[in-house]
Amino acid sequence: MAEEFKEIGPGVEFREPNKPREEGKGLVLKKEVGLVSGITLIIGTMIGSGIFISPKGVLVGSGSIGLTLLVWAGCGVIALGGSISYVELGTSIRMSGAEYAYILKAMGELPAFLFAWTSVIILKPSSVAAIAVAFAEYATQPFFPGCTPPAPILKLLAVFCIAIILGVNCYSVRWATKLQDVFTAAKLIAVFGLVIIGIAELARGNTKNYANSWEGSQSNVGIVALAFYQGLWAYDGWNNLNFATEEVKNPEKNLPRAILIGIPLVTVIYILVNICYFTVLTRQDILDSAAVASSVAARVIGNVPWLVPMFVAFSTFGACNGSAFGGCRLNFVAGREGHLPRLMSMIHRTRLTPMPAMIFQCFVAILFLIPSDFETLINYFSFAAWLFYGATFTSLLILRWKQPDLHRPFKVWIIVPIVMILISGYLVIAPIIQAPTDSLIAAAFIVVGIPLYFVFVKGYYSPQFLVDATESVTLYFQRLCMLGETDSNVELTTNEF
């Protein structure tokens, strides 16, 4: 053992805070994500509560059936454009963390820290919390027919959902991916059931709801942008596999294959499911429904109050697991790069899971369960998310300019990231005009990260008592959870980084 380490327990090492870690002495995450697991991680995260909750929000923002279907298709094109840009970045920079890794390599530490700061505290935990709330709503629906379950029951069930996911992900990466496979299969059964209902109704000639499909179309671009936000909430997760790039087997092949199979498949499913909704229900029925999928099932199958809520609960549980799986990898990589406490970069010595990163993310997600306004969470999340998506697409262009000789196994047409930058700009600016309060609060939160970076990351203010307290906490959790230091598992396609 290198002399800068000292033994503190069975198989646990502690590094002195001011001494560098010897390369090659740490642990690495195992490559457990193959092609099938990659596809299910994408599909399973994307198809969550959004397709069952967002249709009403998209319809309100669009105003007509025709524009609603166009918005859903447009959201799919945006997700595909973003994902193929991420394929180029992920196959040339094989570092987990998605946006964080790419912004770090192209723009430097401060922008990357601002993304990590915003995502670790707001974006990722709020997404996990929102999906957990949706799980609780649908899981309790059969037991409270015709009424809303008490808020304490919903929150306790959401906490239970997050706790189960935390336990599985801390125990085994393989178990977490297998869990994702199972719940993805369950949700595909549900959505294909809705698609079959829609096809059967159309075959019977039930097309009366499509008369005057464009009547009432919204012309206010700000309101249409909010409709896109609602739709893109359902597509959220298209970048999830890039958060775990270091754990993907043969990423040069499996990363693009998983994305190029998963995203178009989800887009087709979403459009077909919405066609089912509009075939069975009128526009007003959808606006009046608290659960659109349940209303469709009740209209066609009859009174089976548990059927749709059960499958939607499966769907949201799988999406919550996928979101937590990807989000905690950001905590892990940011800790390894020194932008979060070093404890975040540690993994269990035998199970090789990022336990501290997962525990922290789930703890913050549980705190987010205190407020319960779902639409505010979506709008708040979308503004900050698309700000950093735009920065990531810009990073692709910067790397094309700064590193033209970087080996790129997959190279996207340059027009695609340029268009994605323009779309990102629209999705950032439009809600500021339409609903400025949430957006400005999010912007202020991001700006707060600047002094935090200089004070804590750059070390402009590092009192000894704070250093000692941090190291004491790190040492305590290393002993408690059998944690070890990690080495980078990054495969670079060039030596320039």
Image: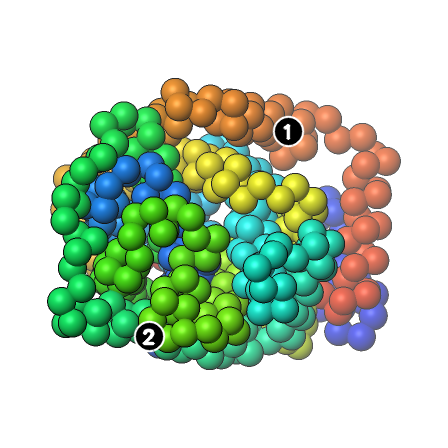
Place of residue 140 in the rendered image (x, y in percent of width and height, measured from the top left): 61, 65
Residue highlighted by disc 1: 452
| Mark 1–mark 2 CB contact (< 8 Å) | no
* In this rendering, position of residue 190 left or right of residue 165: left
Q: Quadrant of residue 29?
A: bottom right
Of tags 1 and 2, the one toward the viewer is: 2
Secondary structure state at the residue bearing disc 2? helix
Of the pair 388 and 211, the residue shown nearer to us: 211
* In this rendering, position of residue 468 left or right of residue 348: right
Q: Indicate the amino acid at tag 2.
A: Gly
Secondary structure state at the residue bearing disc 1? helix
Residue highlighted by disc 2: 193
Q: Residue at x 50, y 68 (%)?
A: 309
Where, quadrant-wise, is the N terminus in this rendering?
bottom right
Of the pair 439 and 61, the residue shown nearer to us: 61
Of the pair 268 and 349, the residue shown nearer to us: 268
Query: Relative to residue 117, is residue 362 depicted above or below?
Result: below
Place of residue 162 in the rendered image (x, y in percent of width and height, measured from the top left): 64, 62
Q: Residue at x 76, y 67 (%)?
A: 481
Mark 1–mark 2 Cα distance, whole angstroms, equals 50 Å
Residue 384 visible in rendering: yes
Query: Relative to residue 209, is residue 450 depicted above or below?
Result: above
Q: Earlier in the sequence, mark 1 or mark 2?
A: 2
Which numbered disc covers residue 180? Answer: none
Q: Residue at x 81, y 65 (%)?
A: 479
Place of residue 127 in the rendered image (x, y in percent of width and height, measured from the top left): 53, 50
Residue 37 visible in rendering: no
Place of residue 464 in the rendered image (x, y in percent of width and height, measured from the top left): 83, 34
Q: Residue at x 28, y 72 (%)?
A: 197
